Image (tube, rainbow, N blue to C red):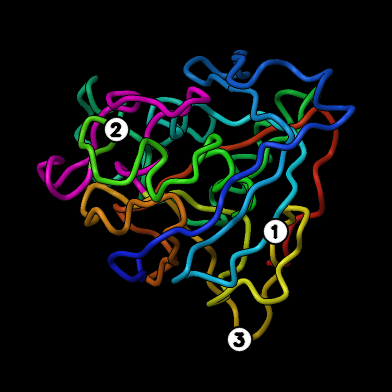
Amino acid sequence: MKAPGSWILLGTILICGSPAASEEPAAGTVSDGPVEGMVFAWIPSGGFLMGSRIYGPQHEVTIQGFEMMTTEVTQAVWEEVMGTVPSFFYTGADSDFARPVESVSWEHCRAFADSLSAIDSTHVYRLPSEAEWEYACRAGASTIFFWGGAMEGEFCWFADNSGSTTHRVGGRLPNEWGLYDMVGNVDEWCEDAYWSNYEGAASDGSPRSGDAEHVYHVIRGGNWGSTAGSCTSASRGYCVSLGGKSSYTGFRLVRTDTPGRPSAQE
């Protein structure tokens, strides 16, 4: 993950009301996914100030409500859908299957999402946009971490407490909307192509398309080997390993009842 080590967030997050928002489920309301081990939490509609002084410019973004997995996709769930386990941290022991799947490329994660959409015709499954990811991670917080202004290891697995390995999902404390491991454990793929700043980014949370000069995709959240500064809510980077796969990187999905906004260009 290529990102500066520490930075400061300025501004205030606003969870804005709307006519549709009053009809939505309560924030954090959970429902089961189509595969055992997948649980989704409701992320309410609202607005927030995205970015930081380091990753700028900071800008207001409005998000429409959606559901997000409460945990990262596990090895067990990946195997159920895709048939194999590609993870570096895999020995075949039962305890492995509760760990997040990793060493999966952006393309493989999108193929996984498409497979789920075929299994469950009532929803569309996809990677979150970068804006959706940060909004869900913050869960209304304006501090640099979703729990406050200083690292607290009970919320995430990172370099100081991971023992240089992944851990079962849901083993740390969740954020206010019931999402576990939003920072630490493994980085998480987003739909967006990686741009070095937010100039020209959409205000509606749509994923950003790539071009000939922007061929990598965004990863968020920090991982088991990250410093505290790479685990902040606004920290961002991209994967440059061979084939876009790394033992540091996994993912979680979002879903909507109707087709989501158009995907970014591949």
**Residue 5 percent across, percent down from the top left:** 28, 66
Q: CA distance from mark 2 to mark 3?
A: 36 Å
Mark nearer the N terminus (2 vs 1): 2
Q: Within 10 Å of the Cα at label 2, are there few (<14), some (14-19), or many (20+) other Cα atoms? A: many
Mark nearer the N terminus (2 vs 3): 2
Q: Amino acid at mark 2?
A: Phe
Q: Amino acid at mark 1?
A: Pro
Q: Which of the two residues, 114 or 169, is positioned nearer the viewer here?
A: 169
Q: Which residue is mark 3?
A: 213
Q: CA distance from mark 3 to mark 1?
A: 17 Å
Q: Is residue 42 magenta?
A: no
First to last magenta residue range: 158-186
Is most of the magenta stretch helix, strand or loop?
loop
State the quadrant of the N terminus.
Answer: bottom left
86 to the left or right of 166: right
Nearer the observer, disc 2 or disc 3?
Answer: 2
Disc 2 + disc 3, Cβ < 8 Å: no
- Name which quarter of the figure residue 162 lies in: top left
Q: CA distance from mark 2 to mark 1?
A: 27 Å
Nearer the observer, disc 2 or disc 1?
Answer: 2
Name the secondary structure under disc 1: loop
- Name which quarter of the figure residue 198 lies in: bottom right
State the quadrant of the C terminus.
Answer: bottom right
Q: Which residue is mark 2?
A: 155
- Residue positioned 47% across, 17% down in the render: 37
Q: Which residue is mark 1?
A: 207
Q: Within 10 Å of the Cα at label 1, are there few (<14), some (14-19), or many (20+) other Cα atoms? A: many
**Residue 90 percent across, percent down from the top left:** 24, 37
**Residue 182 percent across, percent down from the top left:** 42, 39
